[in-house]
Amino acid sequence: MWLVLRRSSITLRFSLIVLALGLPTASSKAQSTSIEEARFFELGGVEQWITIRGANRTNPILLILHGGPGDAQSPLVSTYEPLEKDFVVVQWDQRGAGKTLAHAGASPQTTSLDRLIRDGIELTEYIRRYLHTNDVILVGHSWGSFLGVHTVKRRPELFRAFIGTGQVVCWRGMVETQYRYTLDRARAEANASAVTELEALGVPAPDKFDQYLVMRRWLNGYLATSDLQWLMKQDALLRSALSPDDLRAYRQGFQTMTGLASTVFAMDLPSLGFDFKVPFFVIQGSEDHIAPTPLAASYFEKINATTKRMTLINGAGHFVPMTHMQQFAEALREDARLLRR
């Protein structure tokens, strides 16, 4: 007992000396290597919201391109926190989304695919300089996976790898696959109202968003259970994390789809070719009926890259990073290990 007390006394005196001399302790060292920032940063002449979070600022960077367009993820800190142990997570509210839109007065922000690509490149160049690293992995979810492919095609030398999740391929194929799936489910469940309306509608024309919304209303009832649960949970998380003005702007951000409608209707990643100068990974939910997994798998098979891997997470849907974070994080870690090899 005496020895324990004596050792504690020595430890206490050493701690006091450390504090007096200003020497780094274990906790202060952890604080010095971690990073937690949230601020506006000018991209393409517009102040845009970014967050940078990680337990160790020397870890690989995950630059996350959110979906939507307009579905900013920066407020969902707790959702993405499990990634912060192994990566520095950079979230960016794109033009017309989240705090970027709120800062602009929540009025519609003019944007385009080319403008978003240039914003993303400018942000990547800044992150590389700011954190003194070339180890930037671009992660795109849904719309962000489309934007991400375009970005790595334009400036591959800026990125260590690309990772798509909820991977979109082309609008026409997506709409046709969604329609067949929805009608099959409606028939299987003897949903007479849905069958009647869907049969009368036919496959929505690729450029008729009003027709698509009719079909999508029925599809939403047949999404993966985890997707339906997430959409309810996300709303609660946003209401608790955002001010009324920011929440209003967040919801208005989905109107960004209107300004990018022609771009969305023309989405066709195969037209860019299948050769990539960066490693190419896909992490996909097996039950993704928004960006249908069979389309993503078919596209992935044609990809020509020095390293590639596709991970299917069973039971997950379109929002796999949010609903199955443990499996998603492990897939990310394995992809990072492949890069190190």
Image (cartoon, helix red, strand yellow):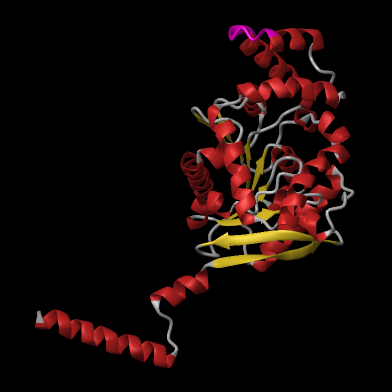
Residue at the image point whose x is 66% and y is 30% from the top: 303
Answer yes or no: is residue 133 visible.
yes
Q: Nearer the viewer, residue 170 or 185?
A: 185
222 horizontally vs 213: left or right:
left
Residue 190 drawn in magenta: yes
Query: Does residue 115 lie above or below 1 as drawn?
Result: above
Q: Is residue 69 above or below residue 1?
A: above
The residue range painted magenta reads: 187-192
- Of residues 116 and 221, the one nearer the viewer is 221
- Among the 4 quarters of the image, the one containing residue 276: top right
Q: Is residue 87 above or below residue 209?
A: below
Q: Quadrant of residue 24?
A: bottom left
Residue in the foreground of this view, choosing between 156 and 110: 110
Is 241 covered by the magenta stretch?
no
Residue occupying image coordinates x 40% and y 93%:
20
So how many labels did they put on this image?
Answer: 0
Is 172 on the left-hand or right-hand side of 38? right
Asked if residue 160 shows in the view, the reply is: no
Q: Quadrant of the N terminus?
A: bottom left
| Residue placed most toward the observer, 136 or 209 | 209
Residue 84 location in percent, x, y? 52, 56
Q: Position of residue 60 (x, y in %)?
A: 56, 56
* Residue 27 on image: x %, y %: 42, 74
Residue 217: where, in percent of width, then height? Answer: 72, 24
Determine the image quadrant of residue 114.
top right
Q: Residue at x 85, y 39 (%)?
A: 260
Q: Is residue 91 left or right of residue 173?
A: left
- Residue occupying image coordinates x 65% and y 27%: 296
